[in-house]
Image: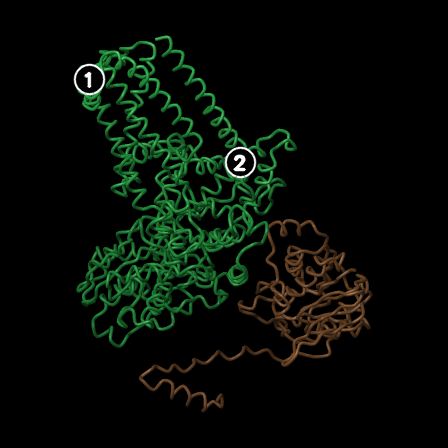
Chain colours: A brown, B green
Amino acid sequence: MKIAVLIKYVPEATAAWRFAGDHALDRDSVDGRLSELDEYAVEQALRLAEAGAATEIGYLTMGPPRAVDAVRKALAMGGDRAVHVLDDALHGTDAAGTSLVLAAALRRMEADLVVCGMASTDAEMAVLPAMVAERLGITAVVNAAALRVEDSTIVAERDTDDATEEVVAPLPALVSVTDRSGEARYPSFKGIVAAKKKPVTTWTLADLGIEPGRVGSAGAATQVLAVRPSPPREAGTVITDEGDAAARLADFLAANKLL
Amino acid sequence: MVLRIVLGLLMTAVAFAVAGRRLAMLYRIGRAAQPVEPGRTRGVPARLRAELTEVLGQRKLLTWTVPGVAHVLAFWGFLVLALTIVEGYGALFQRDFHLPLIGTQPWLGFLEDLFTVATLVSVLVFAAIRVRHSPAREGRRSRFFGSHLDAAWLVLFMIFNVVWSLLLYRGAQINTGNFPYASGAFASEAVARLIHPLGAGANDVIETAGLLLAIGIILLFLVLVVHSKHLHIFTAVANVGFGRRPRALGALLPVYSGGKPVDFEDPGEDDRIGRSSIEDFTWKGMLDFATCTECGRCQSQCPAWNTGKPLSPKTLIMGLRDHALAAAPYLLAEDKSKVDALAAAAAQTPLVGTEGVVHPDVLWSCTTCGACVEQCPVDIEHIDHIVDMRRYQVLMESEFPPEAGVLLRNLEHAGDPWGRGAGARTEWTDGLDFPVRTLDGERIPDDVEYLFWVGCAGAFDDRAQRTSRAVAELLHTAGVEFAVLGSGETCTGDPARRIGNELLFQQLAAQNVQTLNGAGVRRIVATCAHCFNTLANEYPQLGGHYEVLHHTQLLSRLVADGRLVPVTPVGATITYHDPCYLGRHNRVFTPPREILGTLPGTRLAEPQRTRETSFCCGAGGARMWLDETIGTRINETRTDELLAAEPDVVAAACPYCVDMLADGVALRQQQGRTGAHVTVTDVAEVLLRSVREPAANDHRRA
């Protein structure tokens, strides 16, 4: 069984983000990384391979040239190969356009199982898994907390507020995993060295047979009108204990409708 | 006479064969080990000085008075008694043999007897110490806990035998008229008087039998020495000679493989990263293991051991030695298939693992405080071995306590252990009533005297931010122009390096060196003892050469120069805690005390363990970021030690110490075990209180 893992190169959460004139993030001004939520997807794929359920793990990313850093990071954790969809025309692509590109690439990769994170850590839309599955015409199981493969089906556990449900889907399928699915491994130096030798293939829109007009900001279904920094966090209220701290704390919580 | 010669030489031949076989095997283990990194023979004067002070002068042994003096007697006893061995062998051939030139002078006879008696005294003292501090009585508190006790008693018994057999035959020699010294040898003369009544014939027999017995015992002792921890009498000289100078503290060494530094950008195919098995250690490592005499001074000071954790530096080294010896037949065999099954099994035991030679809990308990290295009379380099084993675990196996993953990811992605990121690095300056000059990538202006290295704690930790503000205010008050890197600063890499992630350390350090060199920085002042150590001692390995001062050094200078004038009485008894990375690792003991000593209305109360023997707060070696689940907590133990000095203020000079001790004091206050008035703070904050006018303190509690 072949697994494809969707991974995304996202800007560092702690760094200052700058936006360019077209309201797109200025990727050159900020360091990037493999999305933390995607690390869980990588981890689940590797665990399936270690359990003997998968024979090959390939990664797929769409992003700027530096996205190859995220690819190398995933390859350092494990896996065999990677595909990087790189094309200037992709600048400004929205979620719908991204799913079009990823689905086209996944068709070429011929994976039996697609694993991805529950959301990206930058846009946090969490719609991409369902969109990709829809375009491929395969089952999507989202927000899985545990995964196993049983007789050409994928069994996923999903946590809800009051129960854990076990969902079974026939392969091929797409699964998105949560951050509760299991701590992602820390790549070893051995893994980092090995990753440098693993093949990373670059595909363009032409390779995938996608018209440039269907993606990018021109092909986007949505348009960003403005980008404003979020207001700075206001200082909290400090209650110094003068014997009545508990009562004042309770008053404060009540006044804010928290009690 | 013929009997004497034949028997004497026969015994010698057998003993030399047995001992020689053993020594050859030990030598082959050393040869099978990795080559050592360069520099082990560099700086000959310092090495000779170490031999003079530590071997001949027994400096480190004498830090413990009673056992130290006893060891001096035994050590010098054996040096002098070597003469009697020469005399003994001479007497095999010629009954009245004497050493050439000085061999009949009374002072030499006196000296020999004096040290014979001294050796006897030392044996008695050692025996008394072993009885008094036996593990049976003291349990884990005993420094001999975990040592090979039977072997130690056997050694003492053998030394005792050496002494009495020597005196017996010398006494008989006097009675038969063959003794080289007409007078001076008082102890031998006493024995002679004792056995004189037995008659000339008996004394004749005793002389020969005693001589053969004495030689036999010495030879037996030689065989025992090369098969036991007593090997140190030979290896200590070499171990001190090849040791890191001035001491194996301060900087950690880069990763070496085959004696060459590993290039992490382009590692060689066969590079061995860290230590995955016993043969990955260098021959100096093997020499360390062979030299350990199991005295347990390291164990007695180890913060991990003293708080009920499984790590003892002594049993760690002993375990590695015992494992090396057990695996040796396999490692040294030409044809591995013919090796004894036990040795093969030993050789295949993992070095680190729950079923391995070193349990992971042992490996991860070390705070790298250096108390063991400081104590070790034979200069064993415990920390280097521990970090080398961690390096393999982290870099090659990704095996480490899970909490460390958060630390490593934060360092990688945000450049600080808290994961706050460069953007927040100047938040600590809020509330200062003067601007702090921030380079933010610019070159350092000519009028700036010092780059203030704020450090991650100084930038993000609440308590340490107060220290940063105090130091900034003091420098500002003294008119010292300083600047900070601001968002250009990143973790020095200390916790990454000490947890074993050398790759991450190299990345962080290279980035900082590039920033500092790019800004033209020459002089740095740091408040964090760990940053201070890394900047001063480890960045030169990466081409970063700066004059680095700890803030207590700079502030004490400013006070001495009258640029800072403490006026306001502090009115407190202050107990100062020496941070390991400031004190033991870098020998900065005096400046913080000088600062505190000049403040009006203060009294300094030293804790029991202080200066070189200061006890770790528990945060070093990246332990700050790991859970402490085994035994009692190190910070509470140290807090209790400090509170025993009955201070009003516990002062430290490292943000991690301040954090750890403040937590400890807060807990004791909560438990009602210490007064609510006791505070924990950095030395700089106490100084600032005294430099400010009293009124300023009241409404400006920073």
Q: How many C-alpha atoms fall within 10 Å of the one at disc 1: few (<14), some, or many (≥20)?
A: few
Mark 2–mark 1 Cα distance, whole angstroms, equals 62 Å
Q: Does B505 appear above or below A34?
A: above
Side (left or right) of B288 relative to B101:
right
Q: Position of residue B175 (x, y in %)?
A: 21, 14
A113 and B630: which one is in front? B630
Q: Name the side, left or right, on which B266 lies relative to A47.
A: left
**Circle 2 sits in a helix, a strand or a loop, which is it?**
loop
Q: Position of residue B422 (x, y in %)?
A: 48, 64
Disc 1 target residue: B197
Question: Which percent across, then down, holds residue B695?
Answer: 21, 75
Nearer-the-camera pick, B427 or B654: B654
Residue under pointer 2: B34
Q: Residues within 10 Å of mark 2 (few under 14, many from 20)?
A: many
Q: Nearer the viewer, residue B376 or B107?
A: B107
Mark 1 secondary-structure assignment: helix
Q: Say what amino acid the circle numbered 1 marks.
A: Pro
From the viewer's perspective, tell me whether residue A133 is left or right of residue B327: right
Instruction: Check disc 2 and give the amino acid type.
Output: Gln
Chain letter of mark 1 equals B
Does residue B630 appear in the picture of this structure?
yes
Q: Which circle marks residue B9 in the picture?
A: none
Looking at the image, residue B137 sits to the left or right of residue A73; the answer is left
